[in-house]
Image (tube, rainbow, N blue to C red):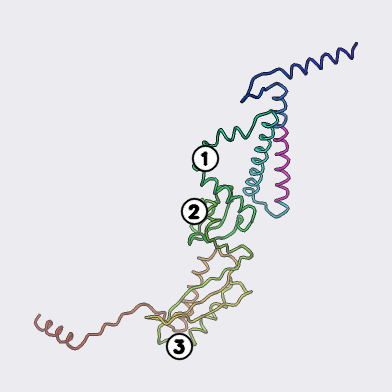
Amino acid sequence: MELDRVVEQLQGVYRSLEIKLFEIAGTPITLATLLTFLLIVVATFWFSKGAQKGLARALKMRGITDAGAVHAATRLMHYVIIAAGLGVALQTVGINLGALFAAGAVLAIGIGFAMQNIAQNFVSGVILLAERTIKPGDVLQIENQFVRVSQMGIRATIAKTLDDEEIIIPNSNIVQGTVKNYTLRDSFYRLRTVVGVTYSSDMRRVRETLERVALDLPWRSAEKEPVVLLIEFGSSSVNFDVSVWIDDPWRTNRRRSALNEAIWWALKEADVTIAFPQVDVHFDAPVVESLQKLHSAG
């Protein structure tokens, strides 16, 4: 008797679960289908949480420790899993996703055009995170501007300029444009400056002085030798290019200033004149005579 009673109760619960509540696009929705839908959604969120933790651990094992990059990658995985889980849940309760997509096709096209730039930056952010050719801390040259990457997101990258100004760069600009990454494989950077001396200077002394200055710089990288080149016979000067290697591209301005000062004082001590633009004016004889007549008349 007790077993019969339990069976009757289970049958009553089953009949309650099968009661039709409402319809969606001709599909009857019962309590059982609603419970199934909720279970799949909950399971999807649970699975997403575990997958995000696993991805974060995997990224850290690969050396990706930047919080912004890890957050962007895990959120991307979360959105993908949730979208897939909702699709499965809707199909389970009998809702035809194809019909929904067809009904919203026009709206989707309109939204797609409106969000074209956002989607482009989003995809570019995924590419940057996957390739790892640019990472936080890298020193870049973008559109003739030196910047250091401070944070990378899915839509944009935040960088700081040499003037300590933070700029927001759309990821599509980085992916589609030409970007110099001075710290991609190493941090060596060739620092150079140009100095012009007068034509009457002793060029051997000039070269020896410039080479000595470059070699004596305490902050240059000792792994690569300095280079001094005579590059041009200018209109008012003989121009030399002096280049040294440094291991921190971000300190370019200060290092170039120190190099220029060292060259200035070394050439001054060597009694070598740094050239400056000069113009010589010559008057023909008729012009001189005319000027003299005007002066006499005055």
Nearer to us of marks 1 and 2 is 1
On the picture, is 275 further left or further right than 82?
Answer: left
Mark 2 crowd level (few <14, some 14–19, many ≥20, 10 Å Cα): few
Distance, label 1 to label 2, CA atoms, is 38 Å
Q: Determine whether label 3 and label 2 are within 8 Å by CB.
A: no
Residue drawn where x is 51% and y is 57% of the image: 161
Q: Determine whether label 1 and label 3 are within 8 Å by CB.
A: no
Q: Determine whether label 1 and label 2 are within 8 Å by CB.
A: no
Task: State the SS at label 2.
Answer: loop
Q: Locate residue 15, reporting x and y percent.
A: 76, 16
Q: Quadrant of the N terminus?
A: top right
Q: Main secondary structure of the magenta part?
A: helix
Could you say which is closer to the camera, residue 232 or residue 289?
232
Question: Residue 232 appears in which quarter of the rendering?
Answer: bottom left
On the picture, is 41 further left or further right than 122?
Answer: right
Residue located beneath label 2 in the image: 165
Q: Locate residue 113, reporting x and y percent.
A: 50, 43
Q: Earlier in the sequence, mark 3 or mark 2?
A: 2
On the picture, is 229 further left or further right than 42?
Answer: left
Q: How many marks?
A: 3
Kind of residue at badge 1: Ile
The disc at residue 109 is 1
Mark 3 crowd level (few <14, some 14–19, many ≥20, 10 Å Cα): few
Q: Which region shows up in magenta?
A: 41-59
Residue located beneath label 3 in the image: 202
Magenta segment includes 222: no
Could you say which is closer to the camera, residue 112 or residue 243?
112
Residue drawn where x is 72% and y is 25% of the image: 35
